[in-house]
Each structure stands twice: as C-alpha cells, then as structure tokens.
Amino acid sequence: METITLEKLAENFQAKIDADIKIEPNDWMPENYRKTLIRQISQHAHSEIVGMLPEGNWITRAPSLRRKAVLLAKVQDEAGHGLYLYSATETLGVSREDTIDDLHEGKVKYSSIFNYPTLTWADMGAVGWLVDGAAIMNQVALCRTSYGPYARAMVKICKEESFHQRQGYEIMTNLMKGTALQKEMAQDALNRFWWPALMMFGPSDAESKHTEQSMRWRVKRYTNDELRQAFVDATVPQAELIGLTVPDPKLKWNEERGHYDFGDIDWDEFWQVVGGNGPCNKERIEARVKAKEDGAWVREAALAFAEKRKMRENQ
Ligand code: FAQ
C-alpha cells in the first residue's frame, strides 16, 4: 500500500485551498493552520463577548423604550456571535472552558476597540456605526475564509452586524438633526472612536506578522491595510452626509488613487491597548471573570439536571 508523505498531504491541502474548497474539521491540516485558526477565531469570539460590555453599560440608560429594545437585541446578538465562534473554535480540538480561561488569565487577545469607555449616549451611535461598520468590512471577507465552520458562522453574523451598523448610523443621524448639544455629543463620539476604529484592522501590512501566511491559506482574503482603506472610503461620505467632521486634518480624496489619503495612526497607543494598558482593559477582564463566578450556580444546576435525567433514562 502506498504511504502518503507529509509533503504530499501539505500539497493536497494547499491545492484544495487554491481551488477554494473548504477545509472541514476532520480534514488533514497543517498544525500551524490549526493554531492560526484557534488564535484568530477565539480572539474573535472573545471580542464579541467582551464587546457586550461597553454597550451593555447603556441598556438601562437608553433614552426611549424603542432604543432600549434595539440596544438589548444588539447586545444579545453579540452574545450569539460569541457562541457560534466558540463552537467553531471547538471544532479545532480545544475546549471552550480552556479558551475562556485563557482570556480570563490574560493569555490571549481580544479586539483593542473594547478597551475604550462609552461615555455618552452618542457613543452607542458611534459604536454601532463605526465599530460594527469596521467589523462588517472585515467579516464580509471572512465569509469566504478557507475553514468551513468559520466561514459559515460568518454568514449569519454579517447579517446581524449589518443591522447593528444601521442602528448606530440612525442614532448619529438623529442626533445630528437635534439640538446644538446633541450635535456636539455626536461629534465628540466620532472624535473619540474614529482612530480606535481604524486600529481594529490590526497593524499595518508592513508590521503584520500573520498576514502573508494567512493570505496564502486564504484564512484572510484581504490584508489589514486593504480593509482599513475600504472602511475609510465607505465611512467618510457617511460622516459628511450627516454633517460630521472626521477628526483627521490629513484626510483628503486622492483622485489618482481613487481612495482617501488619511493621517498616521498612533501605533504606540495601539500596542499599549493590545498589551493590556488601555483605559478599560482591567475592568473588562474583571467583569468577565465576575460573570463567570456569578454564573457558576447556573452551570452546576444545569449539569446536575443533565446527570439526573441520564440516571432516570438508565433506570
Ligand atoms: N486588537 O499579524 P496580525 C466586533 C493582534 S468583532 C487586538 O495582523 P492577524 C463585533 C493579532 O491577533 C472585532 N489584537 O494578525 C462587535 C496578532 O496577535 P498575536 C474582532 C490585535 O490575525 C461589534 C497580532 O496583533 N474581529 O467588533 C488587533 O493576521 C460591536 C499581530 O497582528 C475579529 O477578531 C486588534 N485590533 O490580523 C462586537 C475579526 N489587531 O499573534 C460587539 C477576525 C491585530 O500576537 C460590539 N480577526 N491584533 O497573539 C481578524 O480578521 C484578524 O485576526 C485581524 C488581525 C485583522 C484582527
């Protein structure tokens, strides 16, 4: 019988990727492909869950019943996204418990953006419009990622993110039709969230350590800088339409490139936040650890019930 060498397996794997055939959990895959996916998908899952905190903070203070219902639905959607993504991570052979413990012990990353505080109601507009807007730009591309369970999770997530982006833009639009104070609040939220939203796409292509390999494996379909540029191009006209000013003096349409030129990102700030020293890193992790501890009795009760049912079935 012919034995298949590691080289041949790797060659077949890359041929499948090049032919846009999805890789499924039981297929052979290089160990580094598996590790890359575990890192990216679990970071993504953690981002969805930690991302519930800055908006959850405003549910009790939403200015109307309609706004409260919409915000509540949005935050619940983020929980659902986290659960799909933890499930996708589990298909790669890691346990959900360990993955979550890694977050709580500060061993893994989650999106830098959720380490900024939400100070006013306008921040709910800015988060929906800019943060979900940036998330969609990145995630629409991930619907075509090479790993089947991740790609399929992304399809449903993108539909919901699209609603999130629109509700955020609607909040901003209404504030911009309001009083001088409301306009000022919207502008202030844009001022604070613009640069952190651009940082969501990750380090520049020159600095990104994973992009080249992830593009070859079609885990990523576009580079960090390509998606960041697409986001700027899509978002600047939306800001202008409702009378907001993007806080970047270097922002300028470049006719020749067919894109906006924009100013330099403060990468020191980015790495500080990613490294755990952002304005809210500590309180975000503390909130997640507390949620796990507070929910222990629910998990114990659910397990006890499952155990009891199994015993009854065996009688
Ligand atoms: N924050 O070599 P690269 C959302 C890390 S979902 C923190 O360029 P890669 C929904 C990176 O992981 C938002 N860490 O890495 C929502 C790597 O870490 P390592 C989350 C970052 O993977 C809305 C190192 O830096 N979305 O918002 C960040 O090729 C509203 C080197 O970077 C996703 O996770 C960052 N911004 O490209 C929820 C999408 N950027 O290896 C609630 C999936 C990079 O040192 C409310 N992920 N790092 O441990 C991706 O597409 C990619 O992982 C990138 C980074 C593009 C984020």
Image (cartoon, helix red, strand yellow):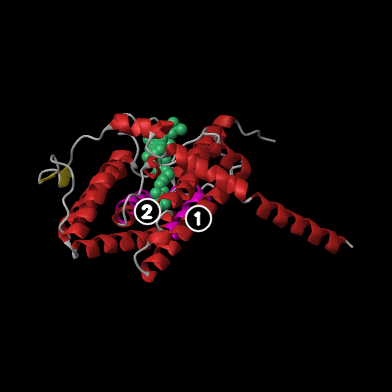
Q: Which residues lie in the magenta part?
A: 129-157
Quadrant in which the N terminus appears: top right
* Residue 143 covered by magenta stretch: yes
User: Is residue 15 something one can see in this rendering?
Assistant: no
Farthest residue to the right: give it. 315
- Residue under pointer 1: 79
The x, y position of residue 14, in whole percent, is 48, 39
Amino acid on which disc 2 is placed? Val
- Most common SS among magenta residues: helix
Q: Residue at x 39, y 58 (%)?
A: 161
* Figure quadrant of the C terminus: bottom right
Q: Secondary structure at mark 1?
A: helix
Disc 2 is placed on an element classified as: helix
Ligand number 1: quarter of image: top left
Sequence-earlier tag: 2 or 1: 1
Q: Nearer the viewer, residue 230 or 289?
A: 289
Residue 209 location, quadrant: top left
Left-right relation of 297 to 22: right
Residue 90 covered by magenta stretch? no
Q: Amino acid at mark 1?
A: Ala
The residue that label 2 is drawn on is 140
